[in-house]
Structure formats: structure tokens, C-alpha cells
Amino acid sequence: MHLKALLCLLVACYESAASLNTENATQKDFPPLLLISFDGFRADYLKKYSFPNLQKFFSAGVLIDHLTNVFVTKTFPNHYSLATGLYAESHGILASHMFDPVTKKKFSLEDDTDPFWWNEATPIWVSVQKWGYKSAAAMWPGTDVMIQNHTSTNFMKYDSKVSFRERLGNITTWMTEDNSVKFAALYWEEPDHTGHIFGPENTTEMTRALKEVDDDVGFMMEHLNNSGLWGKINVIITSDHGMVQCSKDRLIKLDQCISRSSYTLVDLTPVAALVPINDATDLYKNLSNCHPHMKAYLKDAVPDKLHYRNNERIQPIILVADEGWTIVQNGSLPRLGDHGYDNSLSSMHPFLAANGPAFRKGYRMETINSVDLYPLMCHLLGIPEMPNNGSFSHIRCTLVSEKCTDLAVVVGIVIGVFIVLTTLTFLFRLMKNRDPSSSRPFARLELQEDDDDDDPLLE
């Protein structure tokens, strides 16, 4: 009981210190923040390939080995989660293709600019502007959409033909010409594009693509230095998801299990979303026995850990393929590499690196949740968080301003001290019980009256 009380007190003190540090930080001057996403950068690429420039970037800053991202592990849901700190079920961008059962509207990557789909959340660039600052964006998903009547202050409409360097050039121009631009976001398609075409196990093509990514990081650092921004702004490099190898030998064909006339297909692989035409029970039963490498869920039974149940845009039946398996209706393999699978899979996890005046030097963490990035960014910019699923306490130790002690180490010390004290108390009581006892536990000293004045007891 005493140990539990000590631990509760310790945790309370730890969280109070974190809160105090956060409050003190709001009184400081806040440098601008640049957020860069390299789409499909699987976390373990860092161990398998050479990245001299990226290594230089995080060696003088922070590296978080992998992020547990949100389900589904697709580009749009995860980029919006990074920007809002919300799970997909909460921010409403659930997949690459969506259908709203009330309005009958449809969403796709080619038709994504209707504010209806985005207005369930407040992305960080909108918050920045509501607090009197400006933002800039180079093709980050959603930044060109009128979300709560705001686009990013400066933005580029998506065009895959525009190079990374041109995108960065626009960002730095906006930031240097207007010091009220406090937040900027840049999106780049690689190594996702190469991973889809060739698969992540094609080391020749991935080596080429990842060298280009590393070259872009090197150019970014040089360009920021030449622009007078390096060392004066905080820079975060991350990604939305990983990538896994697929194969024509790992196909799940829906036509072998159900009739196309029994459902409407909203989204396909590796997480399929179906709307039953008639009886959902029979359709679900047939899909449940369809393939050993595919799980079928009724919407209300989607596992809690996926956070993919509490939104009306989630369809009545969800199919989830096992890692590396592809769901088709009756076609061939669409791509050699894919993502979208269960977000607990390490192959789906991206990484995060950071550098700038706010970040520690040479600091490394094993993991955080991707939704934890949002409260960190709000802290860096000095703006209040909107309701979110992240936690600043999970990532605060990356910052120079945070007096951060590893809670696990402190708890270990407290437990160790408690064990030592308990042992000493037990030994003391044991030794005391073994002392010879007297029938008179306390006897008053009786003095004999005699003529011996030399008795030392009388001195």
C-alpha cells in the first residue's frame, strides 16, 4: 500500500512539473516551425540504407526510431492525424475513398477539396491563423481546402511534377519575406512512389530512391542555411506510414466468395469498405469464411485498438487483409508494394527526426504515437491545443526547455529504496525478538544503603 502511494505521488509530481514547464514555455518567444513529410518512409529504412545527410540532421538533434501511426495506414488519414492529433474516426478523413451515407457524397484522391470531409477537425495551420499568425504549405494534404473557412495562408495546389527543391524554395521565400509565417508544411511523394511500383524489397530501386531523399535532406539543410533560417527555426522530418512487399501469390479474390450484386464497394485493398445491398448478416457470414488471411468485421465489432468505429462514414462491413496480402475483386496484383494494414505492424511505422533551437542534441527515443506530434507542435508554436488524442508528456523529453527525468528510472529507484527499507525493518525486528527477555521488562534501580562511598553508581 505504501509503495502504491509513493508511486502515485511520484507520478503526480512528474506530471505537475511537465505542466509547469509547459506554462512557463508560453512566456517565451517562439521560432517558426517547418514540418516535412517524406511519404512512405518506413522506419527500418534507416537501418538498412545509408543516409549521411539525414544522419547529420538528427545526430545534432532528435531521432525517434518509430511512430505508431493511425489506422488505416494510408496517406490522407495519417497526414491529417499529424496535423490534428486525432485518430481517423475523430477527424473524419478515414481512407483514400469514402462515402457519406447521409449526403451520398463521395471522396477520392482526385476529388478531395469539398470542406465537408475536412471540417470535423481543426488542423494546426488553421489554429495558427486563428491566433494571428500565418502559415505556408507545399502540397500537404488539406492545406488548399477551405477548412472552417480557412486555407493555409500560402499554399501550392498539388502537382506531382513540381520538384522537392521548388516546393522548398516557395516555403523558404514565404518564411523569409514575412516573419509572421510561423508554421510551414511540405509534402514529398518519395519513397512511397518507388515503393509502390517496385516493392520495398527491391534494394536496387529503393537504394536509388532513398539516396534521392537523403540528397533532398542535404539540400534542405544547405538551403535553409543560405536563407538565414538554419538554426533559427525548428525542423521536423517524418512520414505518414511504411510499406510492405506484396505478391501475385498473395491475392484475396472477393468474387470467389460473394456476388458483386450483393454489395457496393467503397474502398478496396488492403482495407476494404463494403455497403451491403440487402442482408448484411449473410454477406458478413460469407466474407468471414472467405479467406484465412482476411478478417471481416461488422462496423460495431471493429477492435477498439484500431480506433475505427465511431464515425458514420465507416461502412457497415470492413475487411482487413493480413500483412502483404492484397484484396481484389477478381483482378491481378495492382502494385508490388502497399500500405494501409494494421497500424500495430512495424512495417507500417514511420520515423521522426527533429533539429532546431528547441530540440536536444543527439537525443534518441524508441517510440511515440504519431498523434503525439500535434501537442508538441502546439507547444513549439505557443498556441493552445484543440481536443486531441495525443499527449505532450510522451514527447516532451525531446526539448531543451524541459527538465526531463526518465520516469521509469525514478520509479525504479523508489522501488529499490522501498525494498531496502522494508528489508532493514524486517531484520531489525527479527534481531530484537531474539534478544534475551527478562521477566521484569522494566525494573527500577534499587540502591543498597551501605558505607561504601566508592560505589561508581553513586557518582
Image: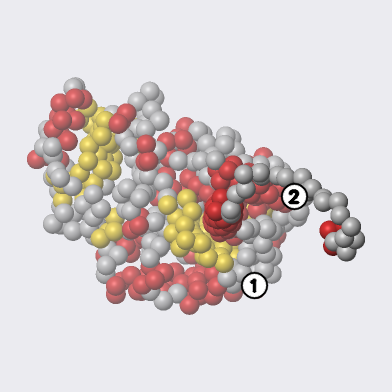
Question: Closer to the camera, 285 or 364?
Answer: 364
Kindly indicate the quadrant of the structure image that contains residue 212. bottom left
Q: Position of residue 169 (x, y in %)?
A: 58, 64
Instruction: Kindly identify the amino acid type of the residue bearing the numbered disc 1.
Output: Asn
Question: Closer to the camera, 240 or 182?
Answer: 240
Quadrant housing the N terminus: top right
Classify residue 99 as left or right of residue 454. Answer: left
Residue at position x 68%, y 49% in the image: 17
Residue 24's mark? 2
Q: Secondary structure at mark 2?
A: helix
Q: In the figure, 115 relative to 52: above or below?
A: above
In space, the residues marked 2 and 1 are separated at their CA atoms by 30 Å
Q: Secondary structure at mark 1?
A: helix
Q: Is residue 296 visible?
A: yes
Q: In the figure, 391 relative to 106: above or below?
A: below
Quadrant housing the C terminus: bottom right
Question: Closer to the camera, 344 or 283?
Answer: 344
Instruction: Kindly identify the amino acid type of the residue bearing the numbered disc 2.
Output: Asn
Q: Position of residue 106 (x, y in %)?
A: 36, 34
Residue at position x 62%, y 44% in the image: 439
Residue at position x 32%, y 62% in the image: 195
Q: Which residue is mark 1?
A: 225
Classify residue 87 as left or right of residue 296. Answer: right
Q: In the figure, 160 relative to 14: above or below?
A: below
Residue at position x 56%, y 46% in the image: 3
Q: Position of residue 89 (x, y in %)?
A: 42, 36
Question: Closer to the camera, 450 or 82?
Answer: 450
Kindly indicate the quadrant of the structure image that contains residue 61. bottom right
